[in-house]
Image (tube, rainbow, N blue to C red):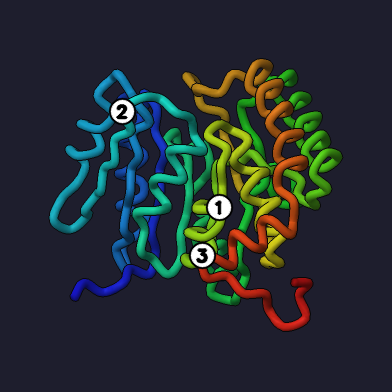
Amino acid sequence: MTARPALSIVIPAYNEATRLSRTLAAVRERCTDPVPQVVVVDDGSVDGTALVARAAASASFPVEVLVLSVNRGKGAAVRAGVAATTGDAILVMDADLATDLAAIEPALALVAADVDVVVGSRAVPGSSVRGATGLRRAMGRSFNYMVRAVTGLEVHDSQCGFKAFRGDVGRLLLALSEVDGFAYDPEVLVLARILGYRMVEIPVAWTAVEGSTVRPVRDSLVTGAALCRIVTRRHPRRVRAEAGRLGWAPRTGDRP
């Protein structure tokens, strides 16, 4: 029987053929002991992203490639990838390598110390952001304020594409999630809060990457509308009941 990996890395990718080789090479160089389970999810790309991912695989660095037949959105891609993981810990990261992989070690140390969800953040002390325009910075701050105001989450940066989970927690949260687009991040964090999971933000070094598929104005509006649907549909009692059917049980002292 194949041993359970210590770490599973999920990389959602949409038309990332020109950048994915460099990203996977960086993961291969950084994560050597032990070798992680790497799952690349091609979210309906039309540029050969899946071929690039498969070409990066080797006997010493296996890469699992899942292909969605149509572009469904980042949330759908992450959900499919996390469902395929088996690791004790799960890392979700963007294909553009915007977040420096030096954040992996502190994130996994927190997971090992019984933190359930680690949120990479560009908005907490110790973080650094390079290459972002003034407009993008202002929109990011405004959007994160809106996330906190609408959802009540005490998270300063829900949208950074770097998050780590305890394995069973990540698989449960993504199984419960419904959002296919960029609002999957705050939805998963809302679910984690409802279920009483411990969340910690850590600073990351983040660099804006040219050719990003994020459209700040349009995606902020779409994601903002999705936030309203999240808070109206994700009633705590209903979420806990659904989680219970998937094997979740409240910790001692948690609200039922």
Residue sitting at x 78%, y 25%: 138
Report the residue that reaches farthest toward the left.
59
Circles 1 and 2: CB atoms closer than 8 Å: no
**Which residue is disc 3 drawn over?**
246
CA separation, marks 3 and 1?
Answer: 9 Å
Q: Nearer the viewer, residue 105 or 254?
A: 254
N-terminal of the two: label 1 or label 2? 2
Residue sitting at x 54%, y 65%: 245
Residue 176 horizontal/vertical position (percent): 55, 52
Residue 50 horizontal/vertical position (percent): 25, 32
Amino acid type at circle 3 is: Leu
Whether residue 202 is visible: no
**Which residue is disc 2 drawn over?**
69
Q: Secondary structure at mark 3?
A: loop
Residue 168 horizontal/vertical position (percent): 48, 67
Circles 3 and 1: CB atoms closer than 8 Å: yes
Residue 62 horizontal/vertical position (percent): 21, 53
